[in-house]
Amino acid sequence: MNNVTIVIGAQWGDEGKGKWVDILAENADVVARFQGGNNAGHTLYINGEKTVLHQIPSGILREGQLCALTAGVVVNPTELVQEIENVRTKSTVTADRLWVSARAHVITPWATYLDHLGESQRKNPIGTTKRGIGPTYAEKAARNGLRLGYFVQDKARKEWLDRMAQDSAPFAEHLKTHAEEWRRFEASAALIAPFVCDAEANVRNAINAGKTLLLEGAQGALLDIDHGTYPFVTSSSTAAGGSLASLGFSPKRIKTIYGVAKAYLTRVGEGPFPTELHDDVAKHLSTKGKEFGATTGRPRRCGWLDAVSLRYAAEVNGLDAVILNKFDILSGLSEIKMAVAYEHPKLGKITDFPWDLDVLKACKPIYKTFKGWPDEVPTTGRISDLPKDALTYVRAVEEAVGIPVAMVGTGVNRGDALYR
Ligand code: IMP
């Protein structure tokens, strides 16, 4: 039975996945996040009310839905406790509807400290969210990490802390100098313990029993540790395939894979961005699109849609369709551009997204130019209801990327969506 749908970000994150997960969750029994941690920020507007989620899947705002964080995520326990308290004012959050993987690794105050230190010492900083994500995945890979299932057991947690302090004098020093932070960290163990379980087994049992699962990606395809613009990436597998490793389930269950892309492009942090703009169009996109990070508040770099990287994301993730989001932000621009290839000073025309950042840095976009549409687009209905020039742009995206645009986002609210 094909009862698993995957939604991932098809760009550098911040595509507005949260809203689409929320819409698609209507037909899902279980919603799960499979990678990343509190570096993500999903902003949802339901009945005009804004909610920002960092770790809990956005399905939590629909009463009755089951939510899971599976093995490949990293969890900041103190922040998760706060997030649970916050969501509790809007929805029911109980242990029988929020499953947090015992296998997931814990983001410790030490990891957060190392992330700050690493960024300040690097000659070329990555521009991380400084949430301790990279150091936590590094410790996991080095097999020194602390799994959530052990974190919530007092004896196992203490043993881990003692071992780390014995092995590392700076760690032992940090325990002393940041005692209050560590106290709060340890205190959160009892508060999240009820939610910690074999989340993977629970989700597998649910899908084997015929329930539908929606897997929610965080960050985006170009931030994938393997397939993204390394080293300017996050430390997890953001690709659709990452969900297979994180949850552990049969790929034969997958029904549809959606990639959410903005109708333009943004990036936070460092790294090459061939279609980046620094003109009035960038100002328009940034202001109208409110392009400031949900997690860090940092202004996002803005530019035109890049069909070269989107085509690459479609291939790497096996996308069935694109969800073209924040389409309304383009309204009012006299002219709209989309990169369909790159021009490299030595290599000539490039149509495949390069792995080599030096090549990418030297690439100039080859644009296709479209007539803008002066008025706001309809917010509900069918994609074919779009004004002629707007529809031409959507069709051009489909042609350039080679897959259909299944839905178009036309505003921040749950209902602001056009369908095929
Ligand atoms: P980290 O995930 O904090 O290690 O940051 C690594 C890179 O991923 C930086 O460029 C961040 O700006 C970027 N990043 C991490 N999370 C997000 C996100 O949710 N949206 C967009 N970019 C992100």
Image: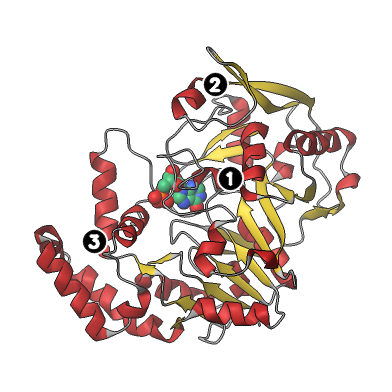
Q: Residue at x 59, y 70 (%)?
A: 249
In the drawing, does residue 97 fall left or right of residue 78? right
Per the model, the C-alpha gap separating discs 1 and 2 is 28 Å
Q: Secondary structure at mark 2?
A: loop
Q: Secondary structure at mark 3?
A: helix
Instruction: Report the amino acid beneath label 2.
Output: Cys
Q: Position of residue 126 (x, y in %)?
A: 37, 40
Nearer-N-terminus badge (2/3): 3
Q: Position of residue 418 (x, y in %)?
A: 82, 53
* Location of mark 1 (residue): 290
Per the model, the C-alpha gap separating discs 1 and 3 is 33 Å
Q: Position of residue 152 (x, y in %)?
A: 33, 82
* Location of mark 2 (residue): 363
Say few, some or many: other residues with alpha carbon within 10 Å of mark 2 (under 14 / 14 to 19 / 20 or more): many
* Location of mark 3 (residue): 110
Quarter of the picture holding the N terminus: bottom right
Residue 150 visible in the shown view: yes
Per the model, the C-alpha gap separating discs 2 and 3 is 39 Å
Residue 47 visible in the shown view: no
322 or 354: nearer the viewer? 354
